[in-house]
Image (spheres, grey):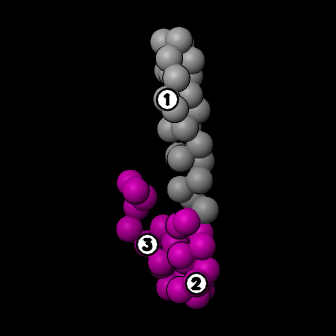
């Protein structure tokens, strides 16, 4: 995902494994939204439909 080593796994953060996974998972949501909005914009701009 392009994050530096230890971004959520560094021991000094004190995050449990479930907390680390949730943090990483939540970080994916904005990237997915950007991709989805871009795809919708491209579809709308071309006058097409993706049904």
Q: Where, quadrant-wise, is the N terminus in this rendering? A: bottom left
Q: Can you identify the residue that label 1 sits on?
A: 50
Are the two marked residues, 3 and 1, in contact with CB atoms closer than 8 angstroms?
no
**Badge 1: few (under 14), some or many (20 or more) residues near its Cα, within 10 Å?**
few
Which residue is located at x 53 percent, y 67 percent? 24
Secondary element at image label 2: helix
In screen coordinates, is 3 left or right of 27? left
Residue at position x 38%, y 54% in the image: 2
Query: Which one is closest to the eye, mark 3 or mark 2?
Result: 2
Q: Is residue 29 above or below residue 51?
A: below
Sequence order check, earlier mark of 3 and 2: 3
Question: Who's the residue at 53% across and 11% down the image?
Answer: 47
Chain part drawn in magenta:
1-25
**Residue 43 is at least partly visible in this image:** yes
Q: x and y percent of residue 31 in the render?
A: 53, 46
Q: CA distance from mark 3 to mark 1?
A: 40 Å
Q: Residues within 10 Å of mark 3 (few under 14, many from 20)?
A: few
Q: Which mark is residue 6?
A: 3
Instruction: Name the residue that disc number 2 marks.
Output: 18
Q: Viewer-nearest of labels 3 and 1? A: 1
Name the residue rendered at 58%, 84% in the picture: 18
Helix, strand or loop for disc 1: loop
Distance from disc 3 to disc 2, alpha carbons, whole Å, reads 15 Å
């Amino acid at each position: 995902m392009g994050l530096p080593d230890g971004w959520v796994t560094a021991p000094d953060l004190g995050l449990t494994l479930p907390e680390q996974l949730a943090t990483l998972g939540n970080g994916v949501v904005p990237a997915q939204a950007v991709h989805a909005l871009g795809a919708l914009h491209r579809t709308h701009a071309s006058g097409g439909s993706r049904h």
